[in-house]
Amino acid sequence: MIIKNVTRGTTVKFTSEFYNANNEVITPASPKLRVYYRSNNEYITVESDMTAEGALWTGSWDSSNADVGMVQWNISSSGVSEDGAFRLIANHANFGTVNPI
């Protein structure tokens, strides 16, 4: 897992392609994007449907209301799942509450 820095206020775009056991691209049923983050010092999980764009599925998350720190995400459908994380960064000139990591 590669952890990247993302600046608060950015809309983060997620893309995923789903494969079966034979490494063939499949069309999953209703894939979901889940994002777990802190906002106003409370932990929140949001879930949204992903949208098909050819063989790729996309989803997005607006980081404007999140506190700085680690953000975890999950994309899943029909027993297939992918996890990851990134660091949300900002300074005192960036809108929102700045909390130390």
Image: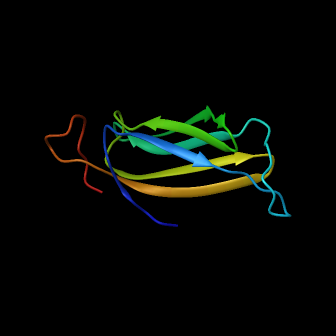
The count of marks equals 0
Residue at the extreme bottom: 1
Residue lying farthest to the right in this orientation: 22
Residue 69 vs residue 93, the one in the foreground: 93
Q: Residue at x 40, y 43 (%)?
A: 38
- Tell me residue 65's x, y (percent): 35, 33
x%, y% of residue 98? 23, 44
Report the residue at 64% width, 41% height from top.
57
Q: What residue sits 14% from the left and 43% below the top?
A: 92
Residue 86: quadrant of the picture: bottom left
Residue 86 to residue 35: above or below? below
Taking the image as shown, residue 41 lies to the left or right of residue 18, namely left
Please report the residue visible at 31 percent of the width from the left and 37 percent of the height from the top.
Answer: 9
* Relative horizontal placement of residue 93, taking residue 89 as reference (left or right): left
* Extreme residue toward the left, this view: 93
Left or right for 26, reference 73: right
Q: Nearer the viewer, residue 41 or 22?
A: 22
Q: Quadrant of the C terminus?
A: bottom left
**Residue 47 x/y as whole percent:** 59, 35
Q: What color scheme is it?
A: rainbow
Identify the image quadrant of residue 8: top left
* In the image, residue 101 above or below residue 62: below
Answer above or below: position of 73 versus 49. below
